[in-house]
Image: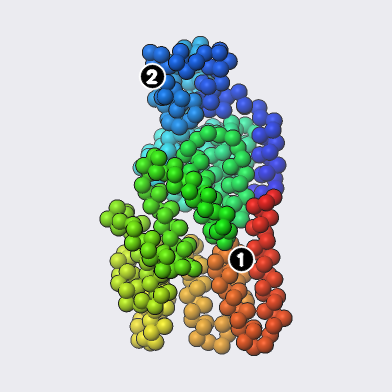
Amino acid sequence: MSISSLKNRVNKRVKNSSRNDFQDIGGYIKKKRKELNVTQNVVSNGICSVSYLSKIENNQIIPKEFYVKEIMEKLDVEKTFYEKDFNDSLYLNKILQGIFYLDDNLIENIFKEIEMIEHNLTINICKLAYYVYFCKKDENQYVMMLENLINNMNNFELKIYLFLASLYYISLDKFKISLEILILGSKIDITNDYLSALYSEYTYLVKQRLLKKNCSSDDYEIAQSIYSRFHNINRSIILALWKTYYISIENPDKSLELLDKIKVSLLDEFSKDFYYIIKAKALFKIGSHNESIVSLNNIRESSTFFYQKTILLYEICLTDEDSDMCDSIKEILQNYKPNEFQLKHKVYYHYLLEQQKDNVKEYLRNIAIPFSIKIDDYYGLEKYTNEIMNICISNSRYKEAVQYYKKWQKEKNRIGQILFD
């Protein structure tokens, strides 16, 4: 996918939409009601409350089929006109709800129901949601295929598709592309709290990854406000943990204060492991090595964070000059096969190994810095760039240090261009 091509397609589609008359069930009901010049009181009378109808029209709930049929009949809409679209839209709304509430079972069940349905645009968007949510390989290349069908999407479908495409590129460590897609999708005028929260959450996370911290706070607050309103505790806690994680990089004391406010008993297993790795790293940074190890001991061996845990244990033992423990941990790490999402931690581990040799500069120049650029890891890039600049300066190689600084600034400027394009 070319981001410029995608922008052109989306802008053309929004400007010259062929499906503006029927964007979604709620939007259609609202438009039809206004065409007939009737109030919500008239339409809802004998069917549902006015507030329920308002939520349907603004896509704030997934309406039950009974209410939709009754409302459509009152608006004199032919059954054949809306029934298929309603069923497809219902699947899309349900899968969006599953993503919003992190409901694995709901998403799995929907996929089982629609797996054999072919040649259906809305259903294919649902299938894409299943693949990106569970980080499965997109074997049917739904992202690329659906890009060619943007002109056939309504605004609701288009906004969901762009959100899913952004998640797809996050899974490929292409955070700059993801940010461009999120910004593009946020411009599509659809009132849906689920989408607003998800767009805001992932925009916050991507901006943080790209070191655009100062312009990410509004995204965080918007997401948390909606999660609070919908009592979405799981997403609220995970997002709060991510904020604490990013704060811990520069201000470990502040992150520990925030962690103390989180009730560990409310966390699921993933969140607990995340909590303890953040706490352990923060404690290590302030020199509380024993407390850091205690925190690490709470992380399960089957955890996503086990590799990070082991690397941090090695770093602690390295700092404490415990060579016997270092050798034992190195043996564990040598036999551990990290997945593609853990490769940046592997790069950091080898950076720790190279620090004990004379060729750390070569490793930074040839591996750590290029890899950080490749996966848009700007925290790692900043760290490795500062390290190699310090090595250059200590050896009076000032011009070379300036070259690395300019390269780093060039990367940061690219993000500014995305945000202000």
Q: Residue furthest left?
A: 265
CA–CA distance between discs 1 and 2? Answer: 55 Å
Q: Where in the figure is residue 175, as x and y percent of width and height? A: 58, 56
Q: Which residue is mark 2?
A: 48
Residue 111, visible in the rendered structure: no
Query: Is there a contact, CB below 8 Å, between mark 1 and mark 2?
Result: no
Q: Where in the figure is residue 317, as x and y percent of width and height? A: 38, 81
Name above or below for residue 234 compared with residue 208: above
Left or right, 128 with respect to 253, comes to right
Instruction: Name which of mark 1 and mark 2 comes first in the sequence.
Output: 2
Neighbourhood count class around disc 1 (C-alpha, 10 Å): few under 14, some 14–19, many 20 upward: some
Q: Where in the figure is residue 258, as x and y percent of width and height? A: 38, 60
Seen at 52% across and 13% down, the residue is 38
Q: Which residue is mark 1?
A: 373
Left or right, 163 with respect to 261, comes to right
Q: Which one is nearer the viewer's eye here, 63 or 152?
A: 63
The three-letter amino acid code for the residue at tag 2 is: Cys
Q: Where in the figure is residue 398, as x and y percent of width and height? A: 69, 83
Residue 94, visible in the rendered structure: yes
Seen at 56% across and 34% down, the residue is 190
Seen at 67% across and 59% down, the residue is 414
Seen at 66% across and 53% down, the residue is 418
Name above or below for residue 1 compared with residue 339: above
Q: Which one is nearer the viewer's eye here, 137 or 233?
A: 233
Neighbourhood count class around disc 2 (C-alpha, 10 Å): few under 14, some 14–19, many 20 upward: some
Element marked by disc 2: loop
Element marked by disc 1: helix
Which quadrant holds residue 292?
bottom left
